[in-house]
Amino acid sequence: MQLIHRAAGAVALALAMQVAFAAPAKPVRKYTIEQFMATTSINGASFSHDEKTILFNSNETGIFNAYSIPVEGGKPLALTKSTTDSTYAISYFPADNRFLFTRDKGGDELNHLYVRETDGSEKDLTPGEKLKASFFGWSDDDSAFYVLSNERDPKFPDLYRYSVKDYSRTMLYRNDSGMSVSRISRDEKWIALDKPNTTSDSDIYLYNLATKETRHITPHKEAASHDTATFDPESKKLYFTSDAGGEFSSIRTYDLATGQVAEHEKAKWDMVGTSFSRNGRFRTSVVNEDGSTVLRVVEGKDEKPVTLPKVAGGAMSSAVFSRSGKLMAFYVNGDRSPNNLFVYDLATRKVKQLTQSLSKDIDPNDLVEAEVVRFKSFDGTVVPSIYYKPKGASASNKVPAVVFVHGGPGGQTRRGYSAMMQYLANNGYAVLGINNRGSSGYGKTFFTADDRKHGREPLWDCVEAKTYLASLGYIDPVRIGIVGGSYGGYMTLAAMAFRPEAFKAGVDIFGVSNWIRTLESIPPYWEAQRKALYQEIGDPVKDREFLMATSPLFHAAEIRKPLMVIQGKNDPRVIKPESDEIVEAVKKNNVPVDYVVFDDEGHGFRKKKNEATANAKMVEFLDKYLKNSTEGKQMGQQ
């Protein structure tokens, strides 16, 4: 819902009378970080061959492991019991209870693919050092599965076909093209290849496994993004998303026999993708609607819309069908409710909730329902954001606020449960999850508006967010900070260095301080995207002066407000020296700097205890330098 301020005589009087005679509001309980972290995060869904259980992932023990749960309901059963590295289940085997899973080491992102045998033993199917492997799907006859691995060339993964029976393998496609292997048709004749040109322009190619010929299927002149979605069950068409000729992506098809392209499905927002059920009966598509996920399901050749069950607590975020098509597993996620797993019987239309993820200690009524808000930036650009207003905030009880910047560049702050956002709101902070220019989901013009402008216009949007927050009447304009992760961490550092007067304090989580080093240290398996990143951010050789001008490290002498930096020691994207050096540089300014390093994390949190520690330290830091600021308190009382 968009936040709109309206007040006119009679309406204002009526509202005032309602407030005057309303019962006293129930006091909001304040929760500890331990209570928030007692909430369980779950994801993934795969039906067993007999359709009696569902395989999923849970961090109930503090770290992700694979679990199964009966379709009829019951207690989840832990199938893996890692205590050091997060383990993510992928899929049951087609005819037995073996399953595939993946894990890396300490967040280094060098994932291997494993199988858990029926006797409980585990086998690494992609052994070796410094390689990255991933599951790519099942063959149509269920005799094999596909795997991508960069063991031959660290830059480009090859496609292998593994036998279900004995795990012997053959190489199906040697990737010398430099493109991303995206999908394989069910008849095993075609491979779709995605080629990123820039972050907003890409192409799709089709490789014929029999003739070894490659076909370009998305020729275009104006910048347009084309991304493979799936082949149809009959292997006659390729489904893909494209924003060619418009602002938003629609789902289109390419006829493999005739080469004809047609628009198949569209919305007023971006169509994110589409997929078919294993039996081909259902097609599911996803719309990114103003920061929320909208799921669509159609059935049969005539694509009759399927009536989806209505479930309280949030929106349906994903759906997976059993092999027979009789059952559908889906997740529901809301601002005040984390992911919960449900199963739906399409014949009886009965819905069963299988999990309860929110901590039993937390009353969801004490949590905050987010709102979609918009404000005009310095040049008139309308900036959409996700906003959390803490309960009890009023003109007579002004609260501090933080501008939260998402990762990317090109990410998006979306509706849905966020333990960090709710923890901040529960501690009395208003949180504005800004979708500054350059964010995805609002059209390609908005998405490309930050190209070669990092550290400038997108940052100025964040500064303008302060003006918006101050206009609400219950935010203390002096006590506003900025927080961000990954690219958002860079934006935090940029704000502190390039607009040092703007924010009272900043928290950088895994953020870039030196673009030159970050771009030079891109992992080899990002090779297909490397040139696109250079195009958007800058080339570390050709654009060295520009990157120095936009890298906070080289302007650290300007930082004069308290700063917290959070870093994972094993981060392969934003390496630890990025944080080490900015911390050392800012300390020379006699500025308070809190530096928190996690030895067993990479880029982002995989372990509950680390996330809890980081969030607790962040709120402690903000309380000290933002909420309890003497200057802010005095200003708020005026």
Image (cartoon, rainbow, N blue to C red):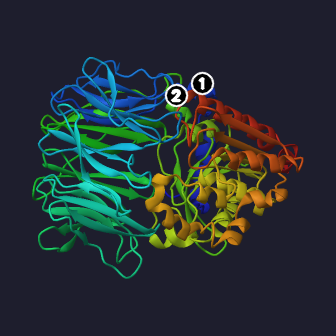
Horizontal arrangement in the rendering, residue 193 relative to residue 592 (left or right): left
Q: Is residue 476 above or below residue 627?
A: below
Q: Of marks 2 and 1, which one's residue comes earlier in the chain?
A: 1
Q: Residue under circle 1?
A: 34
Residue depicted at 45% across the width and 23% down the height: 82
Horizontal arrangement in the rendering, residue 597 relative to residue 73 (left or right): right
On the image, the x and y values in percent for residue 538 come to 60, 69
Q: Residue under circle 2?
A: 363
Looking at this view, is 229 or 42 the one in front?
A: 229
On the image, the x and y values in percent for residue 455 come to 67, 65
In three-dimensional space, the C-alpha distance between marks 2 and 1, rounded to whole angstroms, equals 15 Å
Q: Is residue 52 above or below residue 454?
A: above
Report the amino acid beneath label 2: Asp
The answer to whether one can see residue 379 in this image is yes
Crowd class of label 2 (few under 14; some 14 to 19; many from 20; radius 10 Å)? few
Residue depicted at 17% across the width and 29% down the height: 51
Q: Is residue 56 above or below residue 240?
A: above
